[in-house]
């Protein structure tokens, strides 16, 4: 017989205590998974939480590169990803070998690496960034002769425009965010003329041009809390709507596109979280040879 949701949650909570585990959950996860989290946040906030936790086990409800980042920061903890196939296609658009070739082409360049990337790519990079701090990280490298930005060309393009620096961009992108077209946003704005528009920096430049604010998912959560607007058009993965609506029941949140769904983020369920804790799988562990170099790039990002 299948477990009812209440039974499942009870089992999860009791096993979580026994394992001394913490649940770190990304803003795009299914609502039922967000609701059992110790902390829900964006990539930067979740890395900061991983760095500060005293739990023995981190159950990472997000995608593979996020669990890897937690393993880079906390080598002594057990990091579990409840679904081994929960990946990010953008992170798979770059490899360490191709990045080494790029570095040979631009030997004087510093490499800024979006955290949506494999650990061995981080190990080849000077500094990491997330969508929340990419502009600040590029500004921090003011003395660099050239900057290679990998792997998201649209976040890189945004950081270039905001800082006025020419960046050497990698041709990666997020298949979910490029589905949000400028026409989708314009259509929603025509129907909701009073609404404010927030858009993730992974979106196309034409979509970002229509936004009142270009923000990480954590930035969108804060914007929603603080804005006087009663309606907000949301240009990112639709999993974030659960938290926006839960925290701001008096406001209306309209997805820019219902098509903006990240398949990897949707794999994790309450059942897979319970399975993960029961079996202590799937363990994500970055080998020290890669981890120590990658940690330098992640630590520089966390220093701010
Ligand atoms: P945030 O860090 O803004 O949550 O973004 C993560 C991500 O994967 C966006 O697609
Ligand atoms: Fe990767 Fe895009 Fe999914 Fe974010 S939304 S995890 S960038 S595929």
Image (cartoon, rainbow, N blue to C red):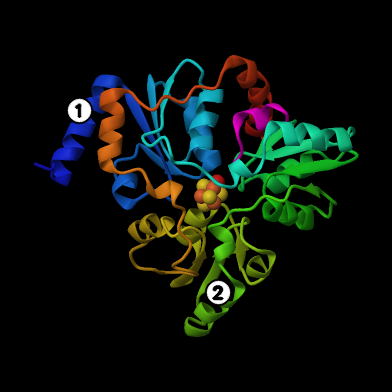
Residue 144 position, x and y percent, is: 87, 37
User: Is 302 displayed left or right of 158 in the figure?
Assistant: left
Reading the image, the residue beneath label 1 is 14
- Residue drawn 68% across the image and 26% down it: 123
**Picture quarter with the N terminus:** top left
User: Is 230 displayed left or right of 5 in the figure?
Assistant: right
Q: Is 117 part of what is drawn in magenta?
A: yes
- Residue drawn 82% across the image and 49% down it: 167
Q: Which residues are magenta?
A: 116-124
User: Is 301 displayed left or right of 267 in the figure?
Assistant: right
Reading the image, the residue beneath label 2 is 185
Of residues 46 and 61, the one nearer the viewer is: 61
Residue 286 position, x and y percent, is: 54, 22
Q: Residue furthest left?
A: 1
Q: Secondary structure at mark 1?
A: helix
Residue 69 position, x and y percent, is: 55, 30
Where on the picture, by quarter, is residue 72?
top right
Callout count: 2
Q: Is 61 part of what is drawn in magenta?
A: no
């Amino acid at each position: 017989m299948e477990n009812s949701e209440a039974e499942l949650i009870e089992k999860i909570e009791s096993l979580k205590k026994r394992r001394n585990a913490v649940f770190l959950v990304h803003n795009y996860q299914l609502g039922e998974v967000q609701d059992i989290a110790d902390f829900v946040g964006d990539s930067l906030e979740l890395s900061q939480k991983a760095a500060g936790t005293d739990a023995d086990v981190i159950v990472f409800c997000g995608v593979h590169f996020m669990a890897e980042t937690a393993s880079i920061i906390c080598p002594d903890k057990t990091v579990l990803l409840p679904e081994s196939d929960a990946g990010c296609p953008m992170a798979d658009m770059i490899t360490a070998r191709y990045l080494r070739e790029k570095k040979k082409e631009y030997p004087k360049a510093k490499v800024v690496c979006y955290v949506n990337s494999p650990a061995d790519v981080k190990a080849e990079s000077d500094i990491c960034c997330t969508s929340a701090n990419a502009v600040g990280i590029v500004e921090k490298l003011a003395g660099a002769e050239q900057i290679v930005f990998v792997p998201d060309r649209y976040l890189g393009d945004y950081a270039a425009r905001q800082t006025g620096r020419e960046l050497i961009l990698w041709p990666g992108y997020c298949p979910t965010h490029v589905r949000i077209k400028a026409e989708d946003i314009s259509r929603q704005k025509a129907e909701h003329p009073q609404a404010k528009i927030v858009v993730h920096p992974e979106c196309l430049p034409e979509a970002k041009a229509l936004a009142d604010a270009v923000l990480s998912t954590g930035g969108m959560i804060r914007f929603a809390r603080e804005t006087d607007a009663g309606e907000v058009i949301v240009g990112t993965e639709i999993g974030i709507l659960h938290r926006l609506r839960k925290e701001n029941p008096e406001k209306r949140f309209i997805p820019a596109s219902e098509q903006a769904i990240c398949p990897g983020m949707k794999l994790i369920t309450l059942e897979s979280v319970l399975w993960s804790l029961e079996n202590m799988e799937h363990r994500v562990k970055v080998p020290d040879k890669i981890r120590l170099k990658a940690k330098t790039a992640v630590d520089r990002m966390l220093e701010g």
